[in-house]
Amino acid sequence: MIKSSLSRKPLTNTKWLLDIARECDIKVIQSPFILDKTEKEKYREIPFPPKLFDQFTAGTWRAEYTEGIFDPSDLVVTGRTGFDNTKGSNLRELLTRNGIRKIYFIGFTTDHCVAETMETLSAEGYECIFISDCTAARNKKLQEKIESKYKNIVSKQAVSEIRENR
């Protein structure tokens, strides 16, 4: 198990890893969780906490990508209705269509979106690898809990794997 440290720099590591993945023609899948109140049926399926705090609301800064994270070449998941990226979305279709069986997970928040999606896809037979220094939870204890549950590596190890398998 890779231990967390206070100086993990998840955003810096994520940008670096994404740049290298794209250079090596690795498919990058973005799965934004956007709450669109105009899509009434889908909006009803969204968990209560994000609606309560008006998080990830379409058309606001809360639904924008952080600079350096998104590239137009990325695949984008649509229709997502839960913390688990598979809920209501086309994620499985994107994975199947692109022949993806091994998935490196990066993202925020570790204890919700990342963990719930890994749980679902692992149960379906996908090889799920958690990149610990490219994720962030609300606190160190939650981060370490997820790190102890899943196979995890750090971004430098992921880059080595990506380059070896080119």
Image (cartoon, rainbow, N blue to C red):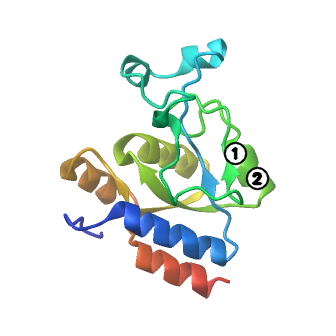
Q: Quadrant of the N terminus?
A: bottom left
Is 162 drawn above or below residue 15 in the view shown? below
Q: Residue furthest bottom?
A: 164
Q: Which three-letter amino acid code belongs to the residue tagged 1?
A: Arg
For this orientation, the residue located farthest to the right is: 97
Residue 32 at x, y percent in the picture: 56, 41
> Residue 155: which quarter of the image?
bottom left
Looking at the image, which residue is at 63% across and 12% down?
A: 40
Q: Say which of 83 and 56 sits in front.
A: 56
Vertical side of 58 occupied by 76: above or below: below
Identified at 55% across, 32% down, the residue is 34
Classed neighbour count for the residue bearing mark 1: other residues with Cα under 10 Å, few (<14), some (14–19), many (≥20): some
Q: Between 65 and 153, which is closer to the camera in this rendering?
A: 65
Do labels 1 and 2 touch, CB within 8 Å? yes
Quick one: 61 or 84, which is closer to the camera? 61
What residue do we see at 53% from left, 36% from top? Answer: 33
Give the residue number, with chain letter if any, for mark 1. 92
State the residue position of label 2.
Answer: 96
Give the answer, above or below, for where 33 lies relative to 121.
Answer: above
- Find numbered disc 1 in the image and state the secondary structure of the residue it sits on: helix
Q: Residue at x 76, y 52 (%)?
A: 96
Q: Position of residue 38 (x, y in %)?
A: 64, 15
Q: Residue 59, which numbered label?
A: none
CA gap, disc 1 and disc 2: 6 Å
